[in-house]
Image (cartoon, rainbow, N blue to C red):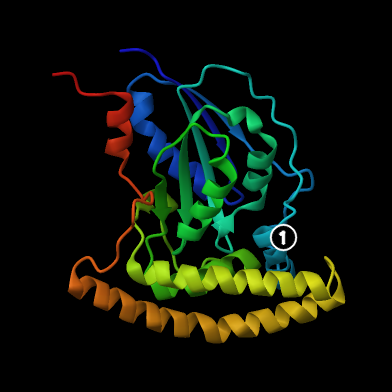
Amino acid sequence: MDSKKILVVSFSQTGTVHKALENALLPFRERGAAIEMYSIETEKPLPFPWGFFRFFSIMPETVLGPSVAIRPLEIPEKDWDLVVLGFPVWFLSVAQPMKTFLLERKWLRGKTILPVITCRELWWSGYQDFLQITEPFVANILEPLVYKEPLASWKTYLSTPIYLVTGKKVFKNNAASWRETIPSAGNLFMESVGKKSFRFWARLIKHVSSRESIGRNVAICFFFLYLLFAIPILKLIGGVVQFVDSNLKGLRKQGGRRCNQSMSSVLESFYPIKP
């Protein structure tokens, strides 16, 4: 069996993406693939825990840009069989450091890309953001492997901001057990509305304030109040959409759009079973 050459580039502030990659890459390692891994680092270290205002203040630039500057990566030019890109979703968008890497690394042109995405609940909009950046110059983008935190939906809406703002985990979980997930009709509805609202608020906040200003902190407070009301309402409506979709068996159509796949289908494309 030929040894596949795999390049892995990832950004992981809390280590969750790295653990998801360990899970995703294990079958390749078992088949003797030659794997080289690189981690993206920002020029100025990102804070953790973020704190309330610093956490929400990155939303406008995450959604609209410009992204944070990163340190140069010395990645050799090789005939890679596969490039794996691992990243989390921030505010329904690709995390800023990975977005910077994608915008700067045009040498990805012609490569086969496998996105590995981690999320608490919603990821589809982040994946569409990824496609918008990469599709113009990447030859083949495989369906993503998406790993979702194994917590009930309502718990993620509490645990995620509290963890990022304070560094404390409200609900215990094992990040290594994050599992592959697929988008539901309810979540697709929430992301569609959420992405549009994030763009509106991002433009508004950038228009009325600059980074690390008092004006931005005031705007963030209004944005946070909006989230307190919007998330429960969207979650309720999304639940109704999901109920209707489940009972009508296939009301939702993907229309040819890429959807999350299993690891086995990725392996079959690289290691076909010989008759």
Q: Residue furthest top?
A: 2
On screen, residue 75 above or below 118:
above
Give the quarter of the image for residue 225. Answer: bottom right
Q: Which residue is mark 1?
A: 61
Q: Is residue 233 visible?
A: yes
Comparing 223 with 19, the one in front is 223
Q: Is residue 212 left or right of residue 117?
A: right
Q: Is residue 15 visible?
A: no
On screen, residue 13 above or below 230:
above
Amino acid at the residue labelled 1: Glu
* Quadrant containing the N terminus in the rendered view: top left
Q: Position of residue 62 (x, y in %)?
A: 67, 59
Q: Position of residue 209 (x, y in %)?
A: 83, 73
Q: Residue furthest left?
A: 275
Q: Is residue 125 left or right of residue 57?
A: left
Comparing 259 with 165, the one in front is 259
Crowding near the residue tagged with mark 1, few <14, some 14–19, many ≥20 C-alpha atoms within 10 Å: some
- Residue at image position (47%, 49%) is 117
Q: Is residue 216 left or right of residue 112?
A: right
Q: Position of residue 157 (x, y in %)?
A: 49, 73
Give the quarter of the image for residue 98. Answer: top right
On screen, residue 33 above or below 244:
above
How many numbered tags mark residues here? 1
- Residue at image position (59%, 46%) is 133
Comparing 58 with 136, the one in front is 136
Q: Secondary structure at mark 1?
A: helix
Q: Position of residue 275 (x, y in %)?
A: 13, 19
